Amino acid sequence: MFRSCRQLRGSAPILRQLCTSRIQTGPSLRFSSHYARQHASNYGRRSWSKIILTTLGGIGLIGLSAWWVYWPHHTFPKSVAKILRKGLWAESDKGEKDYQTALKHYLEALEEADKFELDPLSDEYTGIQLKVGEMYERLNMNQDALMVYSEIASAYLDALTTPGKIPIPRRPHIIQKDLRVVVKIVELNKGNPYASKMLLMTHFLIAQEEVAKRSKTVSKLIKEEKEQILQEVSQQQSPYSNPIKEDSLKVGEDEKIVVIEKNRDAWEPFRDELFNARDLYVAISLATGDLQSAVRTKIATTEWMLNADCDPGEILMSQANLGSLMYLQAEEFEAKEYRAIKQKLEESKIASERFNKKSCLDLALKCYESVLAFSKQLPAQLRREENVEESIALSTYGLGVIKLHLGELDTAKNLLRESRLRAKGSGFNDLVVEAERELEKLGKEVEKLEKENTQKEYEQERIKKLLENKGEQPDIELDIQLNKHK
């Protein structure tokens, strides 16, 4: 559907809410973080998205709500170090957390560093800038903090896009720091989601190009994503494909997970930062209604996570989130189909929307089913990991919602009950609430059907008796005709 980034989604409202809050619009996808919840409140979507946002991602070292200051542990010029110590003392408990004074010292340290002409891209210099930004945040001067972080990101972007400005061996380290700063900027700039999307894309594309240089396999994967973006979803072909195949993951004899065609070295050291930035992009896309971008980005991310040798729990949660996004996409196509019918458009247009709807529903089912199928192969210890438990609960819930959508009420009821039980066991409280809501909705539907069936049975019995007594009763139709001629 963002918790710590490490844990970084009708019935559609539920999936959307589970997508956005953890995006606020369908099932419960856990997108770890404060940002997702804030975004959800700003763009009140439906419940399924809320869960998706909550669970979305399931990967990344830097939480959106927790900023790990990249404070350098390097040697400073003595005069700079002396000023920095004053700042550290002022912001400490011993200094009574005097952030105003600490800010003053850090700004002085920055001026002193300029005198020594420290490299603006160095860990030392950017470390001081980050402390300045942190103090602004603590003083609730977020716009000032945003300016500081934006200055750092701009310097990184300029250096990374200028040939020869950064030595090749140092580029991965700079990219890692750049992505961390960009995520921080997005967190502080919640009021401008469209600018945040462009910022994220600009910077994670640089990271992707860096990975592509190291591996032909990865280069091909990235090229495939670009080609997918250029395709029209409305074409008469399956618009999406399942990134996790049956043989993508295997459990070895030593009970360790084997990822086929893994290439972890190509993604390091910024693997987690890159996937975190892409999942944040997915969350913003979903929260702002750009579902197509959210789906396509998530499909590619899930496939890349396999190649990057991410933890099984993270991959399964990403796959479960993708299933929820596909359900939302199916809903969107269903709405288009309904509008096309209502507007009496060409049959080919209606058939196209219907085809896309079915394709998305089929893929959503495959996503959920693949999570459940593979999780059964996992050793008991791995199955108890939080990400794995939550992905199983979410996939079970998603299947239940789809079955309810398809009118398979008994199956839906069993799946929703199971998902509620699993969600309680894993502490996935948002999903518990949504499962109970779906069960309540299902109960009302069953009650309605029972009343309709009772009425139908009564009418059938009445007709049966009339037919049985036909010889003893006057012909009603004939009697009516005779009355007309009187």
Image (cartoon, grey):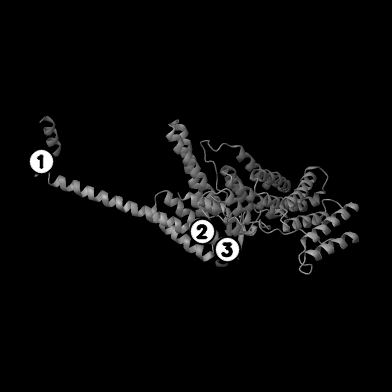
* Distance from the alpha carbon under mark 1 to that under mark 3: 73 Å
- For residue 5, which quarter of the picture? bottom right
Front position among marks 2 and 3: 2
- Residue labelled with disc 1: 474
Which comes before the other along the chain, label 1 or label 3? 3
Query: Number of callouts in the render?
Result: 3
Q: Residue furthest left?
A: 472
Residue 204 image point, x, y percent: 69, 47
* Distance from the alpha carbon under mark 1 to that under mark 2: 62 Å
Front position among marks 1 and 3: 1
Which comes before the other along the chain, label 2 or label 3? 3
- How many C-alpha atoms fall within 10 Å of the one at disc 1: few (<14), some, or many (≥20)? few
Query: Dots 1 and 3: beta carbons under 8 Å?
Result: no
Quick check: 239 left or right of 483? right
| Disc 3 element | helix
Q: Which mark is residue 431?
A: 2
| Disc 2 element | helix
